[in-house]
Amino acid sequence: MEKGRRSFIKKSALATGLVSTFGFKTMAKAAKPKAGKGKKPLVISTWNHGIEANEAAWEVLSKQGSALDAVEIGVKVPEADPTVRSVGYGGFPDRDGNVTLDACIMDHRSECGSVAFLQNIKHPISVARKVMEETPHVMIVGEGAYRFAIDQGFPHEDLLTKESESDWKKWMEESKYHPVINFENHDTIGMLALDEAGYIAGSCTTSGAAWKMHGRVGDSPIIGGGLFIDGEVGGAVATGLGEAVIRTAAATVVVELMRQGYNPQAAAEEAIDRIMKKHQNHRDMEYLQVGILALDIKGNYGAYGIRSGFNYAVQSQEKANELIDAGFRLKWD
């Protein structure tokens, strides 16, 4: 099990047991990290499974391949890995027992594609790219996304593994059948890459919150929410509670802050502060956790989370593939 990522979720889920009264004053602030810098090409992605995703992306980038190809190929690794329970095949189902997938992809030209509430297709990121390249649309959802994928040659596949089905049945026996927002899994994989030519691209893919209401879609397929790229500036990707990311257009905020002169680290921190401010009296705040990655076109990068536990993987021409704990605003006492 991916320790850092699971710790992130468990700490959020156990919040009420760790503090008697929720509030920022019950938490301890952490020191601010320094911004990172890498020589292009460079790839950065969320969570422990970002290590394997980076390796696949690096195979593309190290051979003068495009950032767009890299971010698609990279995140297909966790999409196909049944041990990654928050992405693709083997992902946790919704409360009705259906595995539904969301993904988006974007390049330096502002070309983008997205799918949401997609079922029975293992690689939503590749379907999202087909939406970008083969249709006049940006986003296709549900049955329409499935029919489009089949028309494009993607095979119909059962995505619910025995392990995920067993966990779902256990949850049905032990839990009340109503939404408990923030209590369950809200993580994803997001990736940003800068290629040898200096072009940037990003991708994001997820099976969404475990046991979510049927039809729920988070920030991962939302261009401007969970992912945003501007070829003149850089890009950002978010992970965590999608509803909070959507409410604050987090990825767009980060990119626009970088446009104004913030470095990626400072931009990520400012965006996290805005999310916290907007949610300090919100019903979601009790379990709120969001992590942000940012990368500019010069190869500077940064990462930050509301709470401890968020980590990311980075690889560049001068840096071996490495897992790094992101800075955070709050930690549990």
Image: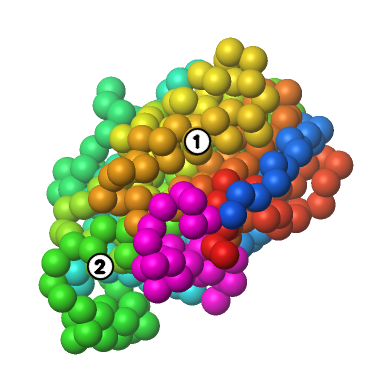
The Cα atoms of the two marked residues, 2 and 1, are separated by 29 Å
Residue type, numbered disc 1: Asp
Residue ID at (53%, 24%): 255
Q: Quadrant of the C terminus?
A: bottom right
- In this rendering, position of residue 267 left or right of residue 133: right
**Disc assigned to residue 273:** 1
**Disc assigned to residue 297:** none
Front residue of this view, candidates 248 and 23? 23
Can I make out residue 30 in this image? yes
- In this rendering, position of residue 3 left or right of residue 314: left
The x, y position of residue 65, in whole percent, is 67, 36
* Residue 214 lies in quadrant: bottom left
* Residue 19 lies in quadrant: bottom left
The x, y position of residue 331, in whole percent, is 57, 58
Residue ID at (46%, 25%): 253
Can I make out residue 200 in this image? no
**Disc assigned to residue 211:** 2
Binning the other alpha carbons within 10 Å of mark 2 as few (below 14), some (14 to 19) or many (20 upward) gives: many
Binning the other alpha carbons within 10 Å of mark 1 as few (below 14), some (14 to 19) or many (20 upward) gives: some
State which region is magenta: 1-27
Q: Closer to the N terminus: mark 2 or mark 1? A: 2
